[in-house]
């Protein structure tokens, strides 16, 4: 079904959704927390049972637009008094089949919480696997999933004039970027994805989002942006007959070449000081570290880039193959499952791939020397959006990079409000065996520190400069002050970048 993002009909649908109270929290309350988790796992029968016999607008819309359930026309007309069933059909979101209105897309509520405040959106996308009842079509436009929410939370929150969203899909990143930007250009190779982006902008009464068709940087050649965001189709897919190539996850290149092409080329569209953020996969090949591969891509950029690359997860070839075969709707035990998994394994074996890393890439067109080159593995749970933390870290780097050790000596620092200290003692021992600094926000890092660094962090209350504190600690510990300074200052820089310490001003 062709989408027709008509402004008037989108406004009418918005009015009906609003009148019904069709919000994420209302839907969760409608069928309960356990059922909501089941829906998130693709199990919709508990939700259908919870809605059985209900004819109120919220329940009808939850069945029709959240679950993708064919609904009696009379019930849908009552739930959509402004738009009407014919209007839903005209938008391309459903079709009629006798006395039923049959969804061709989902429209789901989505909560928003960022530096601009709290709110909600309604996000239209193609029917999911549960609604389709089998493998997804290759032109499927994905809704809001875990990866898209991750990138939305990673987006920097400082204001920007122009933002580029590459591989926009249903437009969730463009909508998120628009909250901090004057103009957003959203691109995609899929015309259907661009239509969903336009529809979602209209449905949520958001202007300033322009859509363009094309791959990577082709649609914006010669232009510059203050920020680039991308949840690109980075999934590594075998170029083998019989393996479906889903537009939403497969960029048409071999291995991790798409992510490599993005990193090598993004500097050309970044304005001075501009930043780029993306999610990606990278391969580990016969002893070659995956992060070293990413490092080489950054080095190949013709424009000097600051790089902060965080690997969050690593999968072996089998786990990776099974993940993405299931993601396409092919279930274990079905006839197609084993051949598809084997196609992935053969593809990895041909390139000597031993593992695949997944993570976050933040790049910045360098404006201070030396450039940032940080490639790390950070595991463990993270709560809350990381965008403000990344903003603070990049700002700290811009300030730290040109500072000499004498400048750091003179700096007055303050320990962050979310930092706590834990000391572990052997029974009966006076001195701790282990001292840990724990970060409550950001990446929730836990650092083992020695007594000198623990003392310095504990003394950073925004009063005395670092150099004075180091000298006092050296006297207290009866150690050489110059040697202690040489040991502590690089670690102080690290603590400022990672957010354990901040400048008092």
Image (cartoon, rainbow, N blue to C red):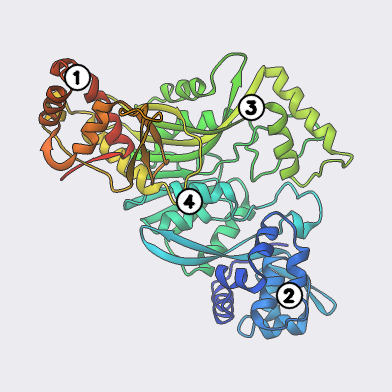
- Relative to the observer, which residue lies in front, 60 or 240? 60
Label 1 to label 4: alpha-carbon separation: 42 Å
Residue at label 1?
Answer: 484
Q: Which residue is mark 4?
A: 152
- Residue 406: give x, y in percent of width and height: 12, 25
Image position of 365 with respect to 294: above or below: below
- Secondary element under disc 3, as helix, strand or loop, is loop
Foreground: 300 or 391? 391
What kind of element bears circle 4? helix
Earlier along the polypeptide chain: callout 1 or callout 2? 2
Q: Within 10 angstroms of label 4, few (less than 14), some, or many (20 or more) residues?
A: many
The mark that comes first in sequence, 4 or 3, is 4
Instruction: Count neighbours of disc 2 (C-alpha within 10 A) and say few if under 14, some if 14 to 19, many if 20 or more.
Output: some
Mark 4–mark 2 contact, CB under 8 Å? no
Question: Residue 255 has which mark?
Answer: 3
- Rendered location of residue 191, percent (x, y): 62, 52
- Residue 396 numbered mark, or none: none
Comes first in the chain, label 3 or label 2? 2
User: Looking at the image, is mark 4 or mark 2 nearer the viewer?
Assistant: 2
Task: Compute the Cα span from label 4 to label 3.
Answer: 25 Å
- As drawn, 306 above or below 147: above
Label 1 SS: helix
């Amino acid at each position: 079904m062709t989408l027709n993002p008509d402004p008037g009909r989108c406004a009418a649908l918005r009015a009906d959704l609003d009148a019904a109270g069709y919000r994420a929290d209302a839907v969760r309350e409608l069928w309960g927390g356990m059922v909501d988790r089941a829906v998130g796992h693709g199990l919709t029968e508990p939700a259908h049972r919870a809605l059985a016999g209900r004819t109120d607008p919220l329940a009808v819309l939850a069945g029709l637009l959240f679950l993708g359930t064919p609904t009696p026309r009379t019930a849908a007309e009552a739930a959509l008094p402004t738009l009407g069933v014919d209007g839903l059909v005209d938008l391309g979101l459903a079709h009629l089949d006798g006395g039923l209105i049959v969804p061709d897309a989902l429209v789901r509520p989505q909560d928003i919480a960022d530096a601009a405040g709290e709110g909600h959106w309604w996000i239209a996308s193609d029917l999911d696997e549960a609604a389709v009842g089998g493998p997804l079509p290759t032109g499927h436009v994905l809704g809001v999933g875990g990866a898209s929410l991750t990138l939305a939370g990673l987006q920097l929150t400082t204001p920007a004039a122009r933002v580029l969203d590459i591989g926009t899909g249903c437009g969730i990143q463009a909508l998120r970027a628009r909250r901090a930007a004057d103009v957003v250009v959203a691109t995609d190779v899929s015309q259907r994805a661009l239509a969903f982006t336009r529809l979602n902008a209209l449905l949520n009464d958001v202007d300033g989002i322009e859509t363009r068709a094309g791959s990577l940087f082709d649609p914006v050649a010669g232009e510059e942006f203050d920020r680039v965001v991308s949840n690109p189709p980075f999934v590594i897919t075998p170029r083998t007959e019989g393996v479906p190539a889903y537009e939403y996850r497969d960029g048409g290149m071999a291995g991790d070449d798409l992510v490599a092409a993005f990193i090598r080329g993004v500097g050309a569209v970044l304005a001075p000081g501009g930043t780029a953020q993306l999610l990606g996969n990278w391969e580990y090949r016969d002893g070659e570290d995956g992060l070293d591969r990413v490092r080489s891509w950054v080095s190949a950029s013709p424009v000097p880039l600051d790089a902060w690359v965080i690997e969050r997860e690593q999968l072996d070839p089998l786990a990776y193959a099974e993940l993405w075969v299931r993601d396409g709707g092919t279930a274990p035990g079905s006839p197609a499952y084993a051949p598809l998994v084997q196609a992935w394994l053969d593809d990895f074996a041909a390139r000597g791939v031993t593992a695949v890393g997944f993570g976050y890439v933040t790049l910045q067109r360098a404006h201070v020397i030396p450039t940032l080159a940080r490639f790390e593995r950070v595991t463990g749970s993270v709560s809350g959006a990381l965008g403000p933390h990344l903003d603070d870290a990049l700002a700290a780097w811009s300030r730290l990079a040109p500072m000499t050790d004498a400048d750091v000596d003179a700096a007055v620092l303050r320990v962050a409000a979310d930092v706590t200290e834990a000391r572990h003692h052997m029974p009966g021992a006076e001195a701790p065996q282990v001292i840990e600094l724990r970060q409550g926000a950001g990446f929730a890092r836990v650092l083992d520190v020695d007594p000198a660094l623990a003392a310095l962090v504990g003394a950073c209350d925004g009063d005395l400069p670092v150099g004075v504190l180091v000298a006092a600690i050296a006297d207290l510990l009866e150690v050489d002050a110059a040697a202690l300074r040489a040991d502590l200052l690089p670690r102080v820089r690290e603590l400022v970048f990672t957010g354990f310490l901040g400048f008092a001003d």
